[in-house]
Image: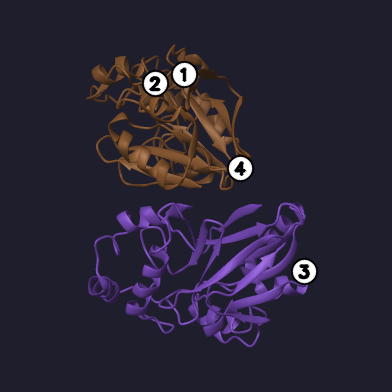
Chain colours: A purple, B brown
Amino acid sequence: MFRQLFDTDTSTYTYLLADALTHEGIIIDPVKELHERDLSAIRELGIELRYTVDTHVHADHVTGSGSLREATGAKVITGAATDLICSDRLIADGETLTFGNEVLTAIATPGHTDGCTSYRWRDRLFTGDTLLINACGRTDFQQGDSGRLYDSIQRLFAFADETLIFPGHDYAGRRVSSIGQEKTLNPRLADKDRQAFMDIMNSLDLPYPRHIDRALPANLTCGLAA
Amino acid sequence: MFRQLFDTDTSTYTYLLADALTHEGIIIDPVKELHERDLSAIRELGIELRYTVDTHVHADHVTGSGSLREATGAKVITGAATDLICSDRLIADGETLTFGNEVLTAIATPGHTDGCTSYRWRDRLFTGDTLLINACGRTDFQQGDSGRLYDSIQRLFAFADETLIFPGHDYAGRRVSSIGQEKTLNPRLADKDRQAFMDIMNSLDLPYPRHIDRALPANLTCGLAA
């Protein structure tokens, strides 16, 4: 089972994955304000939620992980380098989460933040803000490092061209891409070497994130202090 | 197993699908000029080719189906309404092809041509020229009928938003979309009723297809007379 849910306020994608037989499942990047939507989807699909997983400490929305843990008993998972004391488990590169006969594998992809982690399930990558469709996460705050981000994206680009990309956001309504598509169309990456990518990232001159002052401290408590 | 191959000359996507255990497989929309590429991919993956399937009688390229039948013994499959005497089987709406434990299901989607057939495998739709990313096939030749095409696309739109779209072509390098994405972003379909869609299609004023005079007669022989 697979569902892709969208938050129109922050353009955040939340993903629900479950074993079709046992209904054990995982949610990736839930949004606190959409707690009821997510609970409804979980109940409607009959999912027994094992884990709520964040791709990173978000600056643009408050995570729904803590609320979903309280409601369902799911364990809260974040990347090892997030070092979040509210997490039940800090997951390192290559480690896995199992739900029924399905497996989700963590891939440490620092650069947008230190703790950014992408996740692989079957032939799908959930890339959070590491790799977006035709774009990538910014690197100008939260330990952002454009060189490290480039290296992380190259790790993702080592997957087969057919590997599907499910991003953490899209601001133009797009929902899915593939490694092959991003290699050839992503304007920050296609035919760009590490230095050219860093030059692009370092000249973006982006506005201050509108939710960061509320979201960051809240997310250090898995959203419970929001 | 799943591979998405691209013809840079006609921007045609060819798909290879196979059962991971038995290696029995299917090719969708092979291009005659790329016979050697396709044979190499089939051999490299160890695929025992059961079927070569065309989504329709193409006007823009010559099918590789006849050549692949000669090389591999695969059966040539086309949609029932193509009425092609060179086919080994005309497949009707709802009928299936099995390869190992995998199943491909035909969905009659007339409109671009009478015989246009989309195919479903797992949560993936191979839509040929019926539904393209942000576009659709033209309806101004080859029994084209914009009203029928609209009705066919609505049948595809009845699938879940997460259903992946693998089109027959893309002229901008995009490789994959989803039903949810096309419902909201496809400029010919988002918020368009049947009449509005027909008006758009009937005013496109497209150039004469550059390969049609060679491709159409050749494809009536499964590419063997080309």
Q: Amino acid at mark 2?
A: Val
Q: Earlier in the sequence, mark 2 or mark 4?
A: 2
Q: Which residue is mark 1?
A: B115
The percent position of residue A35, horizontal first and vertical second, equals: 68, 65
Q: Which residue is mark 4?
A: B160
- Looking at the image, residue B92 lies above or below residue A23: above
Q: Earlier in the sequence, mark 4 or mark 1?
A: 1
Q: Secondary structure at mark 3?
A: helix
Subunit ID for the residue under disc 1: B
How would you rate the neighbour count of disc 1 (Cα within 10 Å): few for under 14, some for 14-19, many for 20 or more? many
Res A184 → quadrant: bottom left
Q: Which residue is mark 2?
A: B57
Q: Quadrant of the C terminus of chain B?
A: top left
Q: Amino acid at mark 4?
A: Ala
Q: Amino acid at mark 3?
A: Thr
Subunit ID for the residue under disc 2: B
